Amino acid sequence: MECKVIKIGGALIEDGELQNRLCRKFASMSSPFVIVHGGGTFAGQLSERLGIPRKMIDGRRVTDRETLEVTVMVYSGWINKTLVARLQALGVNACGLSGCDLNLVQADRREGRDIDWGYVGDVRQVNMGALELLLQAGVIPVVAPITHDGKGVLLNSNADGIAAAVAETLGRCYDVELIYCFDKKGVLADVGNEDSVISCLTPSLYEEYKGNGVIHSGMIPKLDNAFKSVHNGVRVVRLIHPDDLDQPNAGTRIILEK
Ligand SMILES: Nc1ncnc2c1ncn2[C@@H]1O[C@H](COP(=O)(O)OP(=O)(O)O)[C@@H](O)[C@H]1O
Ligand SMILES: CC(=O)N[C@@H](CCC(=O)OP(=O)(O)O)C(=O)O
C-alpha cells in the first residue's frame, strides 16, 4: 500500500495563502499520508522578540532551556494546531502530535565534542505501531519536530531528519514516497534561477554541487537526509514546491548511482 510522508518547512509556514493552497491539495489526496512540519523561521523571530539569542550551527538550532520553551510552544503549539485546524476545516481528519505523544519519536540528546547543543535530539526510533494505528483509523498524523528522550525530557529535533526517520520506518510496511516541500521549485543549479531545477540528483552530482557552493546552507541537511532515506529503502524521495505537489515529475528526484 502507498503512503506519502510530506515535510513542509519554515518559509511555507510563514505564508498563510500558500499554506491554504497546500492544505487544499492535502484534502484532495487519495492515499494515506503523514505530514511533518518545521517552523524554524517563526521560532527564530519569536526568540528575537523575546530577547533570547539565536544560534544556528550546521542548520541546527543550539537549544538552551529558554529556546526549548520557545520551540515547544511554537512547533507543538501555534504551528501544529494552526495546521490541524486548517486541515479539519477542509474535512481532513488530522491529529497533531509531538514525538512524546504515543511515544512517536524518541531521540538521543546530541553530544558535541566542542559544542554544547543543549536540548537538541537526534532521532533514535519512530513508533511504527502508533503510526499504523492512526493511518488505519483514517487519521492523518501531523508531526511537530519536538521529540523526547524517554526519560521525561523534551528535545528539539531537525524536522527534515524526523521526516526521513518516519519515511524509513513506514517503509517497512508501506510503499513510501518522501516529499520535501520547500520554497523553491527543486534543487537548483543556480539558486537565483527557478528554471534551473536539477531533475535527478545522484550522490556524485551532489558532491560536485556542494563542493562548488551551488548547494549550501539548509539544503545540505535536507539532502543528507534525502540520500540516507533512499539508501534505507524509501522508494521515492523528491524535493518540490508545494504548488507542484500533485505533479508526479516535478522538482528534483533523488537517485542512487546506477
Ligand atoms: N542549490 C540550491 N537549490 C535550492 N535551494 C538552495 C540551494 N542551495 C541552498 N538553497 C537554500 O536552501 C533553502 C531551503 O532550505 P531550508 O531553508 O532549510 O528549508 P526549510 O525551512 O523548508 O526546511 C532554500 O530556500 C535556498 O535558500
Ligand atoms: C534542532 C533543530 O534545528 N530543530 C529545528 C526544528 C524546526 C525545523 O527543522 O524547521 P524548518 O524545517 O522550518 O527548518 C529548529 O529549531 O530550527
Image (cartoon, helix red, strand yellow):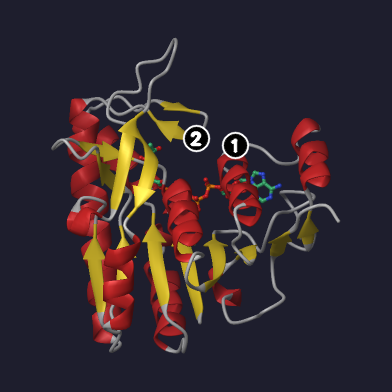
Q: Which sits in the foreground, 8 or 12? A: 8
Q: Which residue is mark 2?
A: 59
* Relative height, residue 118 to residue 14 (above, below): above
Q: What's the residue type where badge 1 is placed?
A: Ser
| Left or right placement of residue 151 versus residue 126 in this view | left
Some atom of ligand 1 lies within 8 Å of the CB belonging to the residue at label 2:
yes
Q: Which residue is mark 1?
A: 217
Residue 131: x, y in percent? 32, 67
Task: Inspect this view and state whether residue 140 appears.
Answer: no
Q: Which sits in the foreground, 209 or 4? A: 4
Q: What's the residue type where badge 2 is placed?
A: Gly
Q: Secondary structure at mark 1?
A: loop
Residue 126: x, y in percent? 35, 53
Residue 233: x, y in percent? 61, 59
| Label 2 with label 1: CB-CB less than 8 Å | yes
Q: Which mark is residue 129?
A: none
Q: Which sits in the foreground, 204 or 184? A: 204
Task: Inspect this view and state whether residue 73 appears.
Answer: yes
| Left or right placement of residue 219 versus residue 33 in this view | right
Residue at the extreme left of the image, as rendered: 152
Which residue is located at x 23 percent, y 65 percent?
96
| Left or right placement of residue 240 versus residue 48 in this view | right
Which residue is located at x 23 percent, y 71 percent?
95
Some atom of ligand 1 lies within 8 Å of the CB belonging to the residue at label 1:
yes
Label 2, label 1: how far apart the Cα atoms are: 7 Å
Crowd tier of the residue under label 2, counting other residues whose Cα lies within 10 Å: few below 14, some 14–19, many 20 or above = some
